[in-house]
């Protein structure tokens, strides 16, 4: 059974990805930071429906804690599917954006990508089969007002996706980014009202976490073995 790690599995999109990967036959590590109880609940639900999962927690901005937790995970074997999904936003107009808001968002999305992906890359390469899927955002593709920090972090993830894909393509490991538009999770609560959704999104609705999970699961499958270095949008024709 191949092993998968989904960072931010305690959140809305991450939990849906964990459920779908488990249904597709992966042994899933459901990751959390502060909400380990939510990750435990997702893992328990997967086990109750016949899947294989366990919960783990660490702060992806803490390089030492991430490395220690991942080394422990690797004792049970290589992780062959990594979904870098943990992310935060801290919006403000750039002219008034604090250094703390700038740094915190970059730290989780970009430094977190390094802290989790780097220790797992060599063990994955050694198996000659792997999938790295980075959850980006429409904001990293076309930009968004009030999200210069978030756009910068996600845009950097898109570029890192392309470079890492080139480096490890010959080892059977694909690297792709999924760039969602507005998806129905806690992250967009209070951000968009019904009227704005109708005006802004051509499909006149927000996306479901399960729709993102289906795309991620396809990229994690054998069928997607020739797709790498791509930024794939899922946004109701928003961009
Ligand atoms: P969410 O429900 O707020 O979940 C965020 C997840 O990230 C949580 O599991 C959280 O863990 C984890 N996390 C935050 N800081 C962390 C840290 N320092 N270390 C480790 N984990 C950390 O958000 P979501 O909507 O599911 O978003 C998931 C991903 O999709 C994010 O990368 C987000 O940028 C991206 N995205 C979302 C949307 C959207 O509309 N929802 C659109 C485009 C892109 P704890 O709760 O355990 O602390």
Image (cartoon, grey):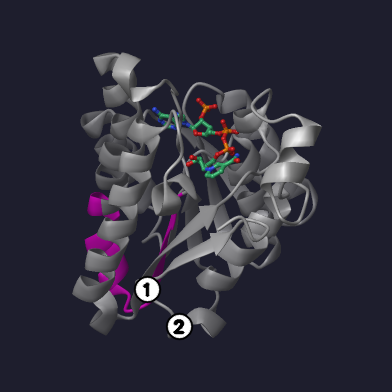
Secondary-structure class at tag 1: strand
Image x and y of residue 52, in percent = 64, 54
Nearer to the camera, 110 or 148: 148
- The reply to whether the C-beta atoms of the residues labelled 1 and 2 are less than 8 Å apart is yes
**Above or below for 82 versus 59:** below
Position of residue 100 measured from the top left corner of the image (x, y, whole percent): 29, 15
Alpha-carbon distance for marks 1 and 2? 7 Å
232 w.r.t. 205: above or below: below
Residue named by callout 1: 174
> Residue 225: which disc?
2
Residue plotted at (68% across, 58% down): 236
Query: Which comes sooner in the sequence, label 1 or label 2?
Result: 1
- Magenta range: 118-136
The quadrant of the image that shows the N terminus is bottom right
State which quadrant residue 124 falls in: bottom left
Specify the farthest residue to the front.
199
Q: How crowded is mark 2: few (under 14 residues within 10 Å), some or many (20 or more)?
A: some
Image location (x, y in percent) of residue 43:
65, 42
């Amino acid at each position: 059974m191949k092993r998968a790690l989904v960072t931010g599995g305690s959140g809305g999109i991450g939990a849906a990805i964990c459920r779908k990967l488990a249904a597709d036959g992966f042994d899933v590590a459901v990751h959390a930071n502060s909400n380990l109880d939510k990750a435990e609940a997702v893992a328990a639900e997967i086990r109750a429906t016949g899947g294989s999962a366990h919960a783990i927690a660490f702060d992806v901005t803490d390089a030492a804690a991430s490395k220690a937790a991942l080394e422990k995970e690797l004792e049970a074997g290589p992780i062959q599917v990594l979904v870098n999904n943990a992310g935060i936003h801290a919006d403000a107009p750039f002219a008034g954006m604090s250094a703390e808001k700038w740094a915190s968002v970059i730290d989780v999305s970009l430094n977190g990508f390094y802290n989790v992906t780097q220790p797992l890359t060599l063990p994955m390469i050694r198996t000659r089969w792997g999938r790295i899927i980075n959850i980006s955002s429409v904001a990293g593709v076309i930009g968004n007002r009030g999200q210069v920090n978030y756009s910068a972090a996600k845009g950097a993830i898109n570029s890192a996706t392309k470079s890492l894909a080139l480096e490890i393509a010959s080892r059977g490991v694909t690297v792709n980014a999924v760039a969602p538009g507005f998806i129905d999770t806690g992250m967009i609560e209070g951000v968009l009202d019904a009227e704005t959704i109708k005006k802004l999104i051509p499909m006149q609705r927000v996306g479901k976490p399960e729709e993102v999970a289906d795309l991620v699961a396809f990229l994690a499958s054998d069928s997607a073995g020739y797709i790498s270095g791509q930024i794939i949008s899922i946004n109701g024709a928003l961009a």
